[in-house]
Amino acid sequence: MTKPYHHGDLRAALLAAAEEIVNRDGIAGLTLRGVAREVGASHAAPKNHFDDLTGLVSELAAVGFTRFANRMQAAAAQQANPQDKLNAIGRAYVEFALADPGLFQLMFRGERLDKTRPALHEAMLRAFGTLTGSVAATHEGDPDAARATRAHAARAWSMVHGFAILLLDDRLNPLLDAGAPRTDALALLDDMLTMG
Amino acid sequence: MTKPYHHGDLRAALLAAAEEIVNRDGIAGLTLRGVAREVGASHAAPKNHFDDLTGLVSELAAVGFTRFANRMQAAAAQQANPQDKLNAIGRAYVEFALADPGLFQLMFRGERLDKTRPALHEAMLRAFGTLTGSVAATHEGDPDAARATRAHAARAWSMVHGFAILLLDDRLNPLLDAGAPRTDALALLDDMLTMG
DNA sequence: GCATTAAATTGACAGCGTCAACATTGCGGC
DNA sequence: GCCGCAATGTTGACGCTGTCAATTTAATGC
């Protein structure tokens, strides 16, 4: 907690400002100079903490994936049997996307991400491991467990991810109640998760 | 076929160049000036045919969605029963994404798309209508058809879309055969589509 | 207390999207 | 067949962006 140099933990301030901007103005509105401006620093200040825009975006994505993994684990912990845990993770997945839409989209924008950064790589492993691990738990004692688990994990993950992405991009509107699309979306997700 | 003005259908040439660039260099490499440069026009030439970058991107997305819809319809036409048609559409969905990755990602990048453009709006309706219509065909005579169809459509669409997106972003690598990820991905998709 | 190193600023550069002013080309009316 | 007009394309400028090099400021290590 050593009060650092000139500003007072500029690195954390930049990350916080970046998250606020991306959730408010979308990814297109997230700019290196804009973030610096927001915290009252010079336009090149971020260079010392993150090398370039890819660095800032990647570190912010790491923060996002860590929180993402925590949410999913917390949701799973409130359920008893494996299938309920998996459904709770799916719900947490979509709820995270709805709560922090800009951050969520940034986390899955591969082109501006350096996945070899340790913080990001580790956070991604933890988030995806939570999901795939929960799928594997529903296949205990299954004869052809390996193959079934792989397909099941890919299906569960693709389903909730596709739903979240399409939802954030207003692509599912034709299927949703025009009056309350947000809450209806979660109802629709429940139908998807619990149908045959 | 009237040979137009100075260039010779500059509009079509710009769209073709844009598609080549986006599939080669990714979305980040698609620039208004770069497209103009590619076809030997001045940097502001695109303004006459598309108002701005959003216009060019939207018209290119319209081209993409039209081709996308055609591929899905052609795939469905080769199958007899409704369930096979739906699976064929899912396969065509992912194969399109793999064949034209840049174009596919651009088509689902809502922030740079003007969905009110007639060409884009119509092409999107046709593509998504193909998919949801095929789902509805599997629920003929179903008692609670409306609700079941909605959830089924959302699930099928989310599944193939999430799979395509995660695949293009190298997110599914942990689940894929490292030796031949592309072909293995289609095998995994088949497992997903045909599992219980 | 001083040298060294980290942190932050300043100024510059090229590339970008966009706009306004201008030049060129092809078309329809006579 | 010519002429005015509208469509098409070019040029130049503006502010914005990311990035780099040079410089200044502040905190740390000895």
Image: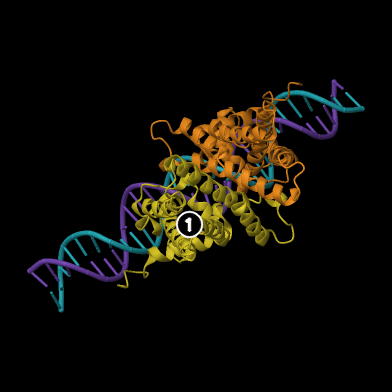
Chain colours: A orange, B yellow, C purple, D cyan
Front residue of this view, candidates A52 and A159: A159
Q: Disc 1 marks which amino acid?
A: Pro
Q: Quadrant of residue B194?
A: bottom right
Please give the chain letter of the residue carrying mark 1: B
Q: Quadrant of residue C10?
A: top right
Looking at the rendered structure, the secondary structure element under dot 1 is helix
Residue at coordinates 56% horizontally, 62% vertically from top-left? B99
Left or right: where does residue B98 sit relative to residue B125? right
Residue B16 percent coordinates (x, y)? 46, 64
Labels in figure, total: 1
Left or right: where does residue B9 sit relative to residue C4? left
Q: Quadrant of residue B183?
A: bottom right
Estimate how packed mark 1 is, as few (under 14), some (14 to 19) or many (20 or more) residues with alpha carbons within 10 Å. some
User: Pointer 1: what residue?
Assistant: B82
Front residue of this view, candidates B138 and A189: B138
Residue at coordinates 36% horizontally, 70% vertically from top-left? B8
Residue B154 percent coordinates (x, y)? 50, 44
Q: Is residue A31 visible?
A: no
Residue A25 percent coordinates (x, y)? 49, 35
Q: Is residue A179 visible?
A: yes
Front residue of this view, candidates B97 and D29: B97
Of the 4 image quadrants, the one containing the N terminus of chain B is bottom left
Residue B2 percent coordinates (x, y)? 30, 72
